[in-house]
Amino acid sequence: MSMSFKILIVIMMARFLIGEKGAFAVDTPVNVEKEYQEAVDQFESLKKNLNPSLVLLFEEGQKTRIQGLHRHQRKLKSAYAQLKEKKEYWDKVYRLYHDLIDNYREIYPEISDDESQELKKEAGILSAGLIKGIGELQQRYKIGTFPIIHNLLIDVGFKKRGACKHWAEDLLTLIDSWEHPHYTSYWAEAHPGNILEHNVAVLAPKNTSFEKGILIDPWRTAGKPFWIRVSQDSHPWRQWGGYEPK
C-alpha cells in the first residue's frame, strides 16, 4: 500500500469516527460506560494508524513546525485534536459518574436492581451535564488566568462573572434543571465575610447532610472540572442558608 493511499484511508477513518455520533442531549439517559469506551477506542484507533513522529508533533504543538504541515497532515491534526478532546471529555464524565455512584452506595449499600439502574441513569445525566456545563461556563466567563487574578479583574470591572460564588450559583442552576431524586443539591461556604471566602456547589446522597457529599469547584482550577468529597477537602465548609437544598 502506497504512503499516499494509507494517508487517505486514515483521513477517511478519522472523518467517520468524528461524525459517527451526533450531539447528545444531557437531559436524557446516557450510557457513560459505553460512550467512554467508544471514545477511548476511537482515539487509540486513529493514533495507532498515525506515524509516531506525527503523533509526537501533534502532542507537542510547536507552532513553527505545525505551520509547515501539508494539507492532509493538517486534516489529520484536526481529527486527532477532536478525538482527543472527546476522549478527555468522556474520561472526566466517567470518573465523576463513578464517584457519584460510589458516594451514594456508601450510604445506601443495599438497593434493588431497578433502583440501581435508575441511579446510573441519574448519575449519567448529572456527570455528563456537569462536565459539559463547566466547559461552557469557562468560555462564558472567559477564564484565562489564575482564579485570584480573575477575581481582581471582576473587582475592577474588567470581568463580570467567574468568581467562586458565580460558579456555585450557575452550577446549582444547572443541577436543579435536571431531576435528581437520589441526590440533594447544596450551596456550601467557607470563611464567609472575609477575603478567604469561598463558595461551592455540592451534591450529596438524598436524606444526608452536605458533609456527606461531593463538592464541585472549577473555580480553584481556573475552569477545569474539579470535585472532591466535602469531608476530604481542607476548607471549613458549612451550609449556606441563602440557598434552599433541592
Image: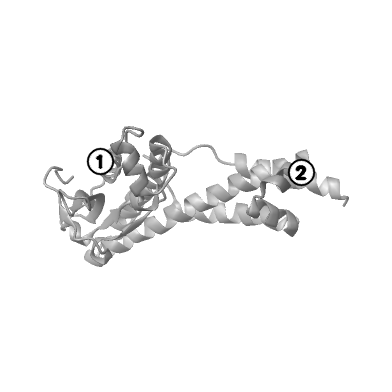
Instruction: Please name whichever residue, 40 or 169, is drawn nearer the observer in this view of the structure.
Output: 169
Sequence-first disc among 1 and 2: 2
Q: Which image quadrant for residue 212?
A: bottom left
Q: Position of residue 171 (x, y in %)?
A: 30, 43
Single out the residue that lies furthest toward the right: 2
Q: Is residue 219 left or right of residue 183?
A: right
Instruction: Please name whichever residue, 27 or 80, is drawn nearer the observer in this view of the structure.
Output: 80
Instruction: Please name whichever residue, 85 or 13, is drawn nearer the observer in this view of the structure.
Output: 85
Q: Amino acid at mark 2?
A: Gly
Q: Which mark is residue 169?
A: 1
User: Which residue is at 34% across, 39% downward?
Assistant: 153
The image shows residue 25, relative to residue 30, as above or below, that is: above
Q: Nearer the viewer, mark 1 or mark 2?
A: 2
- Label 2: how many residues lie within 10 Å, few (<14), some (14-19) or many (20+)? few
Q: Which mark is residue 22?
A: none
Q: Which image quadrant for residue 8?
A: top right
Q: Is residue 193 left or right of residue 155?
A: left
Question: Can residue 171 be seen from the camera position used here?
Answer: yes
Instruction: Please name whichever residue, 5 or 80, is drawn nearer the observer in this view of the structure.
Output: 80
Mark 2 lies on residue: 68
> According to the image, what is the colour scheme of the structure?
one colour
Residue at disc 1, secondary structure: helix
User: Which residue is at 31% across, 37% downward?
Assistant: 154
Mark 1 to mark 2: distance in Å?
A: 45 Å
